[in-house]
Amino acid sequence: MLKIPIAPNSIQKGVPLKLLLDEEAVTQLAQNINFVYPAFNPSSFISETLKGMEDLSLKERSSHIANSLKAFLPHVYSEAIEILLKTLTPPLKKTEGNGLAGLFYMPHCSFIEEFGGDIAYNNNIDPFEISMSAQYKLTTRFTCEYSIRPFIVNDERRTLQLLYKWMEDENPHVRRLCSEGTRPRLPWSKKIDSFISNPEPCIPILEQLKNDPDLYVRRSVANHIGDIAKDNLDIALFLCEKWLDNASPELKWVIRHALRNPVKRKVKRAIELRNSAK
């Protein structure tokens, strides 16, 4: 039976997040894979994966587990990712209050992030479509906002083509990925320099999602605008001013949240817009 370990509902004071990817998580991952792929060697995987993991950070553990997966799964990316997708538990039914259990799937995302663009690992067949489809499924269990960024950087045109479709998806987790994954300065992640220089390719996504019915998505839009404001303040102010016209209370919240850092820097126009959005 496929399972994920029980985890706290929120970050616990004094308890490092990296402990969510511990021996229990590695063992459960091995059991899940063995359940759908009997040729897998769970005991060897667990033993090898746990070596040297104790001192690693959360992201380092995720990458470490991903590399171990590569060593123990079939040596063709399309076959390996298909097995991992078969181990997924049902999608999340809500967007808020899901707790930290989804971090179990962080190594799955790291696997795509690190190996999902490697043509040589996929018998010299471009794995782009496979990787994007996998992230579409994974992001409904744990956000793929980090793993999608190398695809934006390395293949912006094709990735944005898909995100422009996904921004209209019925699933709010997929819609949020479109905004959150394209943030120019997403925390815990590498910057997307092209969007720092020119955020215009992201504007259609923000326009589509600014009035999203789900707060989870609207919060991402606000944070994305906040990122833009750090490097392209005029564009951020222009969008907020345009959105303010006949704005709903929900959209006014987006505007206020988006402008909180320029307001802290005492940018006059930001203060005026934020006051008008109350």
Image (spheres, rainbow, N blue to C red):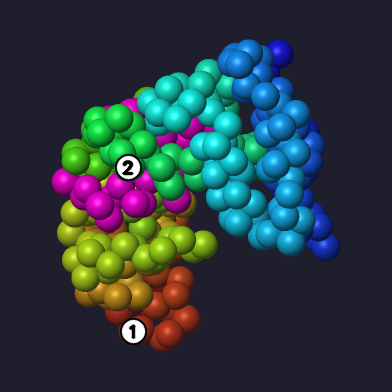
**Residue 206 percent coordinates (x, y):** 29, 50
Query: In what quadrant of the picture does the N terminus appear?
Result: top right
**Residue 137 percent coordinates (x, y):** 44, 27
User: Vertical placement of 189 versus 215: above or below?
Assistant: below
User: Vertical placement of 81 versus 120: above or below?
Assistant: above
Q: Is residue 165 magenta?
A: no
Q: Report helix, strand or loop for mark 1.
A: helix
Q: Residue at x 40, y 31 (%)?
A: 77
Q: Residue at x 73, y 49 (%)?
A: 51
User: Vertical placement of 79 versus 139: above or below?
Assistant: above
Q: Residue at x 76, y 56 (%)?
A: 54
**Residue 230 percent coordinates (x, y):** 35, 75
Q: Report helix, strand or loop for mark 2.
A: loop
The front one of 238 and 172 is: 172
Whole-angstrom CA distance, mark 1 to mark 2, is 45 Å
Does label 1 or label 2 sit earlier along the sequence?
2
> What's the amino acid at mark 2?
Gly
In the image, taking residue 242 as reference, residue 225 lies left or right, namely right
Q: Which mark is residue 117?
A: 2
The front one of 62 and 221 is: 62
Kindly indicate the quadrant of the structure image that contains residue 278: bottom left
Count how many numbered circles sit on residues in the image: 2
In the image, taking residue 163 as reference, residue 252 lies left or right, namely right
> What's the amino acid at mark 1?
Lys
Farthest right residue? Answer: 14
Q: Is residue 130 magenta?
A: yes
Local crowd size for mark 2, using a 10 Å CA cut-off: few (<14), some (14–19), many (≥20): many
Q: Which mark is residue 268?
A: 1
Kindly indicate the quadrant of the structure image that contains residue 263: bottom left
Which span of residues is magenta-colored? 128-157
Q: Which mark is residue 16?
A: none
Local crowd size for mark 1, using a 10 Å CA cut-off: few (<14), some (14–19), many (≥20): few
